[in-house]
Amino acid sequence: MIYEHAQLTIHPDGHKEFRTTYPAIRENLLAVQGCRSVDLHPSVDQPEVYLLRVGWDSLSDHTEVFPQTEEGRTVLALLKAHVTSVEMIHFDGDTVSPH
């Protein structure tokens, strides 16, 4: 399992519209092969920033499969309407042992 962390900066004053669109974004992501979880978290100190956290079975499910699907194209179009910038990084789902 890997986790995609996408830091989304939305248009100023676009919170209501973005949050209205989020259920469709989530539904389309979850319909794609390998997508296991989708969560959206608002920033507490930067009002225009959200963290979209998506769990994937593998990196290739996100980077190769997702963009080729109709659902992937829909997600990207929905995000494009609301987002001014995206910073993305992938994390291994395994936790680091403190021992």
Image (tube, rainbow, N blue to C red):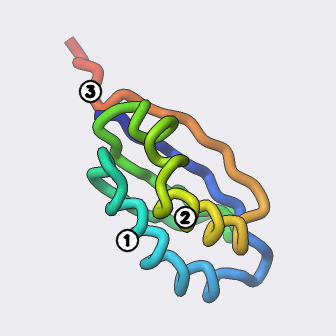
Q: Is residue 49 above or below residue 58?
A: below
Separation of residues labelled 2 and 1 (CA atoms): 9 Å
Where is mark 3, residue-wise? 94
Where is mark 2, residue-wise? 75
Q: Quadrant of residue 26?
A: bottom left
The residue nearer to you, when weighing 91 against 64, is 64
Q: Is residue 86 above or below residue 47?
A: above
For label 2, the SS is: helix
For label 1, the SS is: helix
For the residues bearing labels 2 and 1, Cβ distance under 8 angstroms: no
Q: Is residue 66 left or right of residue 83?
A: left
- Quarter of the picture containing the C terminus is top left
Where is mark 1, residue-wise? 27
Please name the amino acid that badge 1 sits on. Glu
Dot placed on the residue nearer the N-terminal end, 2 or 3: 2
Dot placed on the residue nearer the N-terminal end, 1 or 3: 1
Which residue: 65% across, 62% down? 49
